[in-house]
Amino acid sequence: MPKTGTTSIQSSLCRGLHDARFRLLTLDSFFGNLLIGSAFSGDYGVGSRFISHGVTEAMAAKVPQESRHYLDQGLAAAGRRGCLPILSAEIITNLPEAALERLRDFVVGRNWQPRVVMDVRSPLDFLESRFQQRLKAGIMVRGAPTRIADYLEFSVRLGYARPLQVVDRVFGREQVAMHAFDPAGFPGRCAVRHFCGIAGIPRESVRVIRENDSLSLDAVRFLYALSVAGRRRLRSRVDRLHRAVLIRRLQELSGETLRFHEDVAGRYAEAVRENLSWLEARLGCPVPLSRRSRDGAGGVRCDDDLLDFREESLEWLAGAAGRRKVKRGQGTDTVRVVAEQLESMRMLVSPRQLMRECLERARELWWRALQKRRNLR
């Protein structure tokens, strides 16, 4: 399930795994999301998903075939080497049942028995984390709105436990190791070590690479302002690079994290109560609505709350952008100027910052390419 330490697990298995008995089959900078999504979704699309943003019609016809070919060759190579292939497949909770069946049949057809390892996050925590993640993406996945009321309706319609039930049904409950995402109960509070213990990977053979890309509420408000102002589309690789630099700068903005108000959280909790009962029976343990501290007061209630910038954050923005501080309470004018200052920050990126981002990106792609070659041997 997304937002359960998956990025740390993927990075650690890609760059820090030192055990020839296991290998991560990855093809792309989104780990299994592009590989599994393009190979089995059935509607890879042209720019209709985050993983297919910027994809042309020619690529949309070609990439799925290439992904299936790579996976076919990677599974065969793993069989020859006698090692266990690992697929990062968090995207399957967003795919239709037919896509999961295609994935299962593909793996079984190559003489492998698929086993699913899944951590499940508490519903309110997942609701908030997914909202932030979609804002950070810079583009919205088809059908996933950013307006809070629409987002809540979308999340209720999608269902909390329904995707998990589909995984059970397609792969067989006995083949799905489902666990509650509770870092307090993980070895060293580490999701990577937790996964390795379940998968049978000796923890000493994995160098843990921790990835924490969460943002403060003030930073989320700024990204929301960009979205509302119509500046959320990333049209080129340069746009993506500048977006990455902006996100890195926004991570410097500390403060409280995003919490939805009880009005929002309560409506979602009521809508998924039946789902939660099923999940608790499935896991054999209680699952709280949230594992975060909540005092019942405050929190984001509506879109206007996300556009109610704190004075301290506006001062930070003015300093980062080299501009005068934006005045609060000016409605759309405040939002427009905030968005302009955020966009102007990318023009103030030093050559050193830009070079660092490029080098990190190049290093990551080099690791993935190296991994790909190894997986085919």
Image: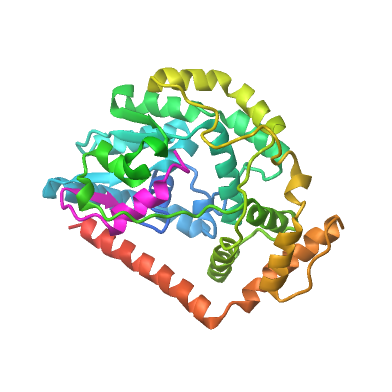
Give the camera-side residue of 43 and 207: 207
- Residue 57: x and y in percent read 52, 57
Work out which quarter of the rendered image holds the C terminus and state it: bottom left
Query: Left or right of 249: which side holds 23?
Result: left
- Residue 58: x and y in percent read 48, 59
Query: Left or right of 267: which side holds 211?
Result: left
Query: Left or right of 216: which side holds 164?
Result: left
User: On screen, 167 above or below 132?
Assistant: above
The residue under the point 15% across, 45% down is 79
Work out which quarter of the rendered image holds the N terminus and state it: top left
Q: Give the colour scheme of this rendering.
A: rainbow
The residue under the point 79% across, 59% down is 335
Please check the rendered image and state whether residue 10 is part of the magenta-colored stretch, yes or no.
yes
User: On screen, 356 above or below 235?
Assistant: below
Give the camera-side residue of 10 and 327: 327
Q: For the magenta stretch, what is the residue range?
A: 1-26
- Residue 293: x and y in percent read 57, 37
Please check the rendered image and state whether residue 247 is part of the magenta-colored stretch, yes or no.
no
- For the view shown, which residue lies furthest in the front direction? 295
**Rendered image quadrant of residue 62:** bottom left
**Rendered image quadrant of residue 245:** bottom right
User: On screen, 311 above or below 83?
Assistant: below
Q: Does the image show residue 41?
A: no
**Rendered image quadrant of residue 230:** bottom right
Give the camera-side residue of 161 and 72: 161
User: On screen, 258 above or below 297?
Assistant: below
